[in-house]
Image (cartoon, coloured by chain):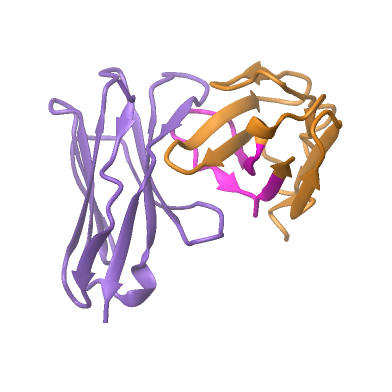
Amino acid sequence: IAGITQAPTSQILAAGRRMTLRCTQDMRHNAMYWYRQDLGLGLRLIHYSNTAGTTGKGEVPDGYSVSRANTDDFPLTLASAVPSQTSVYFCASSDSGQGTDTQYFGPGTRLTVL
Amino acid sequence: QKEVEQNSGPLSVPEGAIASLNCTYSDRVSQSFFWYRQYSGKSPELIMSIYSNGDKEDGRFTAQLNKASQYVSLLIRDSQPSDSATYLCAVDSSGGYQKVTFGTGTKLQVIP
């Protein structure tokens, strides 16, 4: 069982380019999340999905979009990358999305936008 | 005002000592509290969760919650060099579907 996988591991991207970060989980968790982690700012929620077919905005959603076509996949798209989107991106999932759930994190994608 | 505050550290303790990590939060309706450990270059992993006032022990780890003071702490007994990591405090105040806010983390260094 892999848990959560993310791809790519790292990427250098020119500003203005479109980029999709992939996230797949095999735990059949209902809820999935995208965070970015920046030095001094900690983990900040970008978007979330409580169940397949639904998504919601987190703390820092601008410039990002997500979709949840099925239970396992939760891709994050940067429509037109900007240097301020340089960060480490973590995908996470939890069983039911309830407040007491444990979140399980993927290995992360390190993105650099030049 | 940050919703979840932690001292960034580094907190340095000698091997075998007790490490005490602290976290305060601003939302009084917060109901679930988590401590995640993150090694450098790795992803966070849950080590403790606590939902009620008081202490919760799991091996060398003890989480302490005081809702009246809006304070949650993590004690690590018999600290080992392998405990050297950044510890993230996370608080859920949604009351329903999870909406977790993370602190910026405290870096712990255990000196052999």
**Number of labelled discs?**
0
- Whether residue A30 is visible to the viewer of this picture, yes or no, is no
Q: Is residue A22 left or right of residue A98?
A: right
Residue sitting at 62 percent across and 41 percent down? A87
Residue sitting at 49 percent across and 25 percent down? B99
The residues colored magenta run A86-111
Q: Residue furthest left?
A: B69
Viewport quadrant of the N terminus of chain B: top left
Does A49 appear above or below B106? above
Q: Quadrant of residue A24?
A: top right
Does A6 appear above or below A19? below
Of residue B26 and residue B50, the one placed in the foreground of this image is B26
- Whether residue A50 is visible to the viewer of this picture, yes or no, is yes
Is B98 one of the magenta-colored residues? Answer: no
- Who's orange, chain-wise? A
Q: Residue furthest bottom?
A: B112
Of residue A81 and residue B83, the one placed in the foreground of this image is A81
Image location of residue A85, percent across then percent down:
66, 33
Does A81 appear above or below A94? above
Image location of residue A89, percent across then percent down:
64, 42
Viewport quadrant of the C terminus of chain B: bottom left
- Who's purple, chain-wise? B
Image location of residue B109, percent across then percent down:
30, 66
Does A4 appear above or below A48? below
Q: Is residue A30 left or right of residue B35?
A: right
Image location of residue A59, percent across then percent down:
53, 21
